[in-house]
Image: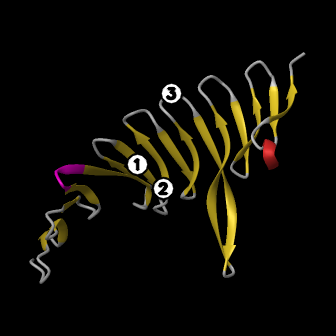
Amino acid sequence: ITYSDGTTQVVIGGKVKKITRPDGTIYNYNNEELVESVVSGGVTTTYSYTLDESGKILETILTDPLKTVYYDGANKLKRIVFNTGKTIEYNNGILSKAVDADGTTYIYEEVPVTKDNITEYEAKLKTIITSAGIKYHITDNNVSSSDLPDSTTYTYYDSGPFQGKIREASLPG
């Protein structure tokens, strides 16, 4: 089948098997008519699915040469794993955690934002844990305190001319 915009569609046995868009992007479908792969700009992204016993999609996994991306059954982003070792995690489609290849971890919290009587959620950086084990607590986009592996804790000024400077140190023992 060829459409007026130049898109072609291959149907075999009543099921869509392939769609080619005018820009050259090719969509290949499996027997359940789920996307099996997409070829665009010379890059192939493969799709795989986890289904329940009734055939409902529980998870969609996309893999390309740089990363693997996971979506939940509601098609909300769950996780991205890069070939570099970096991982990004989402909760309900909202950024919740990122881990760099060196182990540095960034933890985010969901914060409600209301505009025009509509509440949406955004991610706000809450904690950074370095690969050396230093834990930075973030408040209003500023470091409010830090914990060292030896149990030393530093508290920082959060405003004024000393903002970001150490206000107090609590040493172990």
Q: How far from the left and from the top, in percent, is residue 52?
A: 45, 55
Name the amino acid type tagged 2.
Leu
Magenta span: helix, strand or loop, mainly?
Answer: strand
Residue 43 sits inside the magenta stretch:
yes
Question: Between disc 2 and disc 3, whose residue precedes?
Answer: 2
Q: How far from the left and from the top, in percent, is residue 170?
A: 87, 26
Mark 1 and mark 2 residues within 8 Å of each other at the beta carbon: yes
> By what rule are the colours in the image chosen?
secondary structure
Question: Between disc 3 and disc 1, whose residue precedes?
Answer: 1
Q: Nearer the viewer, mark 2 or mark 3?
A: 3
Residues 40 and 62: in front is 40
In the image, taking residue 28 as reference, residue 59 lies left or right, namely right
- Residue range (magenta): 40-44
- State the mark number for residue 87: none
Instruction: Looking at this view, name the residue that lies furthest to the right.
Output: 173
Instruction: Looking at this view, name the residue that lies furthest to the front.
Output: 161
Q: Label 3, label 1: how many angstroms apart (C-alpha)?
A: 20 Å
Q: Residue 11 falls in which quadrant of the image?
A: bottom left
Looking at the figure, which quarter contains the N terminus?
bottom left
Count of marks overlaid on the render = 3
Name the amino acid type tagged 1.
Val
Q: Secondary structure at mark 2?
A: strand
Tag 3 residue: 102
Q: Secondary structure at mark 1?
A: strand
Q: Secondary structure at mark 3?
A: loop
- State the mark number for residue 77: 2
Q: Label 1, label 2: how many angstroms apart (C-alpha)?
A: 8 Å
- State the mark number for residue 69: 1
